[in-house]
């Protein structure tokens, strides 16, 4: 489980394809603290550390992960938001994030609000958002402002833009979305 509070940015150092799998090698400030078999969310997608070599670590993404997330679009030099799993007994500063990306969304507008920035996203998926509910965008725990059918907006403070890969999101950028787990269960129960 994660909280959506980003610890650092990780840089893509190498990408290797093996059949339908892709091995991503990253560097980040806490590589020296990682262990093999540890879960780390990359743009909100929970992946397992499979190798560590000095300042770099490697993860493997399977075909389903590549189809459902934006990880297959990564290039060497790109940066992703990273968060290690939550420790039992620590504060839950964001919201409950599983690291199971539901789908991708596309940024359709960015507006400077003179203190914060509004990002508008569209998506083609059956889950819904609610105003003042939670959403995870590239692993970042956020509050939904505007909520419409297959569209939502979030307002981002300058600190978050500076310390996550939101600083690189432009109109047309593809992001990972994980919808609120409580909302997903409510939808499933009501749908029966």
Image (spheres, helix red, strand yellow):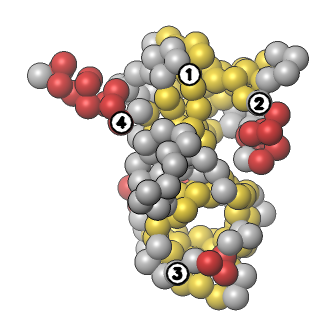
Quick check: marks 1 and 4 in contact, CB under 8 Å? no
Q: Dot 3 corresponds to which residue?
A: 35
Q: Verify CB contact (< 8 Å) between mark 3 and mark 4.
A: no
Disc 2 on helix, strand or loop?
A: loop
Is 54 displayed left or right of 63 in the figure?
A: right
State the CA–CA distance, disc 2 to disc 3.
33 Å
* Cα–Cα gap, marks 2 and 4: 24 Å
Q: CA distance from mark 3 to mark 4?
A: 28 Å
Residue 144 disc label: 1
Name the residue nearer the viewer: 73 or 5: 5
- 3D distance between C-alphas at marks 1 and 4: 14 Å
> Which image quadrant is residue 94 in?
top right
Looking at this view, name the residue that lies furthest to the front: 89
Residue at label 2?
Answer: 157
Element type where label 3 sits in the image: loop
SS label for mark 4:
helix
């Amino acid at each position: 489980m994660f909280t959506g509070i980003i610890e650092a940015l990780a840089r893509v150092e190498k990408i290797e394809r093996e059949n339908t799998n892709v091995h991503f090698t990253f560097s980040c400030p806490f590589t020296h603290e990682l262990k093999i078999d540890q879960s780390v969310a990359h743009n909100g997608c929970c992946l397992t550390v499979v190798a560590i070599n000095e300042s770099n670590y490697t993860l493997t993404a399977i075909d389903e992960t590549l189809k459902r997330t934006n990880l297959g679009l990564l290039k060497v030099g790109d940066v992703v938001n990273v968060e290690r799993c939550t420790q039992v007994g620590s504060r839950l500063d964001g919201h409950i994030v599983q690291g199971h990306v539901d789908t991708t969304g596309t940024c359709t507008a960015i507006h400077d609000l003179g203190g914060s920035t509004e990002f508008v996203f569209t998506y083609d998926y059956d889950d819904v958002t609610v105003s003042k509910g939670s959403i995870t965008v590239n692993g970042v725990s956020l509050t939904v402002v505007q909520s419409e059918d297959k569209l939502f907006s979030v307002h981002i403070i300058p600190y978050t833009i500076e310390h996550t890969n939101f600083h690189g999101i432009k109109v047309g950028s593809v992001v990972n979305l994980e919808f609120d787990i409580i909302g997903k269960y409510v939808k499933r129960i009501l749908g029966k």
